[in-house]
Amino acid sequence: MENNKLMKKIAFLSVFHPYRGGIAQSSGSLYFALQEKANVEAINFKRQYPDILFPGKSQFVPESDDREAIDGVRILDSINPLNWLNTAKYINNLNPDVVLTRYWIPFLAPALGTVLKKTKKNAINISIVDNAIPHEKRIGDDALTNYYLKQNHKFIALSKSVERDLYTLLDSPEVHYHPHPVYDRFPDPIDKSKAREKLGINADEKIILFFGFIRDYKGLDILLHSMNDVDNDVKLLITGDVYGSYDKYEKIIKDNNLSDRIISKIDYIPDEDVALYFSATDLCVQPYRTATQSGIANISTHYNIPIIATDVGGLKEVIEPFNIGKVVEKADPKEIAEKINAFFREEKDYSENFKSYKEFASWEKLSDVILEAIEK
């Protein structure tokens, strides 16, 4: 590995700490894994989204949250074209062998694509593609994505569904696949009874968890409707910041008399508190309407919490081969309820299955795939 470290210089342009969210967290984990094998420079956003376009409360983690702090530069401004040229100049002055970027939303395509257009003659441009087709489509998305993709020489797909999308969108692209690794930088799990005591949950209650940013495509409304058919001794713990308004979910809860079965913390969950919520739960449910891969699934696997998810994107390819949960054919309340009820009636131990998956989906192995792609 030492020869690799001497030979390869990687400019890794992505969103990192202090930004919040799965892309920033996972980019940090990959940065640390790559550091063991190459010379890596982290290049972060100075401005990711204008505040007026950001639907959540804040783009940043609390100042006290420094778990993912990275020694890099914050330079890229997503809405300043002159800055894009300056960012490309900065990267070219580093003289990297590789420019590695993350792609997850068309809004950032002009900034990232323009930088890459200016670096592609000097370095190998490799894109880690989280979403080739956005969850929530808007006019112009296809053109923006096409512009960005064409500035890259090679691609890393984090799910088979993204791999298929890339082959559809591009003519004979070079695509390398590795599943989204398990998040490993969160705090260790805590004792279940202590976690429940802190959250005011009884030790013998059956708890299912909806975790993460609350957005329409994630189907919290579907899960709430499913509670009408879920056994009455099961409660739903909802945690995460909401994009937009929470009013429609409150209305479902009220109209279906679910208040006594819902525990909610509608706010951003700092990294240091993630263990509390996963340690208190029995099952993570992802009733998504659309997906590619899921960071939430990989937090759940970190805490050995089984998953029930709809058959969208790459969720099935994670859950079924390793038997770490159940897959629902479609985002239908009754089908989701059936799977939840079956899970609690089976009382199955998934511990060994999680161990196998963690060995398979690691940041170290993803870093190896990237380095192998460079050499190919």
Image: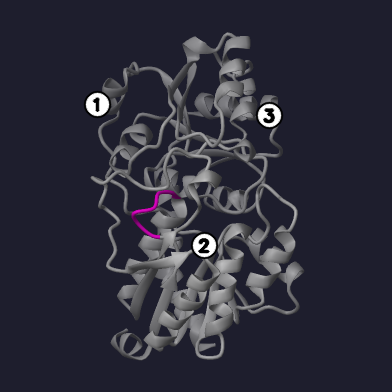
The x, y position of residue 135, in whole percent, is 65, 49
* Comparing labels 1 and 2, the label whose residue is closer to the camera: 2
Q: Is residue 19 magenta?
A: yes
Element at label 3: helix
Residue in view at x 48 percent, y 82 percent: 372
Residue in view at x 53 percent, y 30 percent: 343
User: CA separation, marks 2 and 3?
Assistant: 41 Å
User: CA separation, marks 1 and 2?
Assistant: 43 Å
Mark positioned earlier in the residue sequence (1 or 3): 1
Residue in view at x 61 percent, y 53 percent: 292
Mark positioned earlier in the residue sequence (1 or 2): 2
Q: Which residue is mark 3?
A: 335
Image quarter of the C terminus = bottom right
Mark positioned earlier in the residue sequence (2 or 3): 2
- Compared across the picture, whether 287 is left or right of 27 comes to right
Element at label 1: helix
Residue density around tag 2, few if under 14, some if 14–19, many if 20 or more, within 10 Å = many
Q: Main secondary structure of the magenta part?
A: loop
The x, y position of residue 94, in whole percent, is 37, 85
Above/below status of 274 relative to 370: above
Q: Which residue is mark 1?
A: 194
Element at label 2: loop
Inspect this view and state whether residue 239 appears.
yes
* The magenta segment: 16-21
Q: Is residue 165 magenta?
A: no
Residue type indicated by callout 3: Glu
Residue type indicated by callout 2: Ser
Q: Which residue is mark 2?
A: 78
The x, y position of residue 130, in whole percent, is 56, 60
Residue density around tag 3, few if under 14, some if 14–19, many if 20 or more, within 10 Å = some
Above/below status of 119 relative to 41: below
